[in-house]
Amino acid sequence: MTDTASLPNASAEAGTDSQVTVVTNRSSVSERVLSIVIPIFMVLLAIAAWQAHIMINEVPRYIMPAPLDVVNALWTDWGTLSPSLLVTLRITVMALGLALLGGVGLAIILVQSRWIELALFPFAVILQVTPMIAIAPLLIIYMPDTQSALLTCAFVVAFFPILSNMVAGLKSVDHNLLNLFELYGASRWQTLIHLKLPSSLPYFAAGLRIGGGLSLIAAVVAEFAAGSAGKGSGLAFRLLESGYRLNYPRLYAALVLLMLTGVAIFALTSLISWAMLHRWHESALKREN
């Protein structure tokens, strides 16, 4: 009788939320594993195709190095490439930090008054639409040293996306919530801190991801334009040097370091974005159905 009585309970429990939770957890774990395995597999597949192309077509090393040649160049030339990587990375991080401070700060100032925005925003647009390759030589002339010029170039490129996104975010606050804050007598400072800045976080996260990639690109492009060389030069100089010397394994190794740096910056900014938004914003929440 006991066994028979327990059967309806077991069948009833099969349709409860506990059973659904178990299935959901298993699905979530499998999706996370696949989201890691699939990109890694595709990268390895691309490298294997590259190696196969070199072997099947017998491409000479001085035309295109094989993946193993690039790995060997990373190992043997690490003493030359690592200082340049640190220079490029330092300029990129400093430029992004300054762009965050300047972009967020200026955005807060612009949204306080329509007249201030009309007066200052055109200058930001002019800096953004002017090609960096044209600005870099002038900065090299007027800046005290080359590193300051490179930092300024990277800052200018990363600055506008953050500014533009923050202005859009600060202006996209729900008008009903603004009216509610005004109804309760909140000051402009309280409205900014407790309503506008939290509401603009998704826009800030988008600007951060864009600015992170652009700061690295701008640092490399500015160094190309500056033509800096010798000690204290970044990876852009190593690319030019390797090309002039026909040392293509080192050239590819420098490219790999730049790509890995860009991927690391994107991953870090995406992680920061997820940490800010995953608890409340729709863009970071997983659908329940």
Image: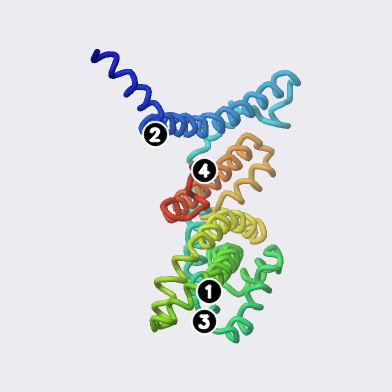
Measure the C-alpha gap from mark 2 to mark 1: 38 Å
Left or right: 6 as drawn, with respect to 207: left
Mark closer to the observer (2, 4): 2
Mark closer to the observer (1, 4): 1
Mark closer to the observer (3, 1): 1
Give the mark, 2 or 1, whose residue is nearer the N terminus: 2
Residue, disc 2? 21
Q: Relative to 36, does residue 215 appear above or below in the rendering?
A: below
Mark closer to the observer (3, 4): 3
Q: Within 10 angstroms of label 1, few (less than 14), some, or many (20 or more) residues? A: few
Which three-letter amino acid code belongs to the residue tagged 3?
A: Gln
- For the N terminus, the quadrant is top left
Measure the C-alpha gap from mark 1 to mark 4: 56 Å
Give the mark, 2 or 4, whose residue is nearer the N terminus: 2
Give the mark, 1 or 4, whose residue is nearer the N terminus: 4
Measure the C-alpha gap from mark 2 to mark 3: 47 Å
Give the mark, 3 or 4, whose residue is nearer the N terminus: 4
Which three-letter amino acid code belongs to the residue tagged 1?
A: His
Residue, disc 3? 112
